[in-house]
Image (cartoon, rainbow, N blue to C red):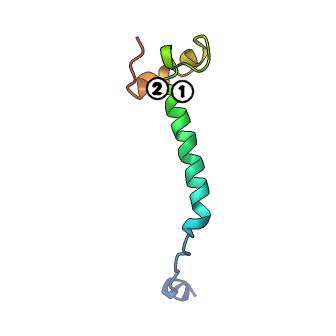
Amino acid sequence: MIDAVLDSTVMPLPLPVRELMPWMIFGGLLMLLAIYFVGAEEGATSLIPGMYVHEFVHDGRHLLGFPCH
């Protein structure tokens, strides 16, 4: 019984790019938004007034190598 299972060939299902592309674009936009808030949401480029976003992502900035001091 085990030999029959090991001998069978399992073929991977093809992933249609047309169905994945909207999700890949959505994920890429979310990643760009996250990089903006971690890396550039401070000072002259700030979209949200105050230091709330900066303080929220402060440790992430240092972890990713963005200077902020």
Residue 39 numbered tag: 2
- List x then y, in percent, for residue 28: 53, 46
The type of residue carrying mark 1 is Phe
Tally of numbered tags:
2
Give the residue number, with chain letter if any, for mark 1. Answer: 37
In the rendered view, would you say 19 is above or below 48? below
Q: Residue at x 57, y 11 (%)?
A: 51
Q: Residues within 10 Å of mark 1 (few under 14, many from 20)?
A: some
Circle 2: element type = helix
Q: Nearer the viewer, residue 68 or 45?
A: 45
- List x then y, in percent, for residue 4: 54, 89
Q: Residue at x 58, y 66 (%)?
A: 18
In the rendered view, would you say 11 is above or below 35? below
In the rendered image, which quarter contains the C terminus?
A: top left
The type of residue carrying mark 2 is Gly
Residue 68 numbered tag: none
Q: Residue at x 54, y 33 (%)?
A: 34
- List x then y, in percent, for residue 57: 54, 22
- Residue 13, quarter of picture: bottom right
Q: Are marks 2 and 1 in contact (CB under 8 Å)?
A: yes
In the rendered image, which quarter contains the N terminus?
A: bottom right
Q: CA distance from mark 2 to mark 1?
A: 6 Å
Q: Nearer the viewer, residue 40 or 58?
A: 40
Circle 1: element type = helix
In the rendered view, would you say 32 is above or below 43? below
Q: Residues within 10 Å of mark 2 (few under 14, many from 20)?
A: many
- Residue 68, quarter of picture: top left
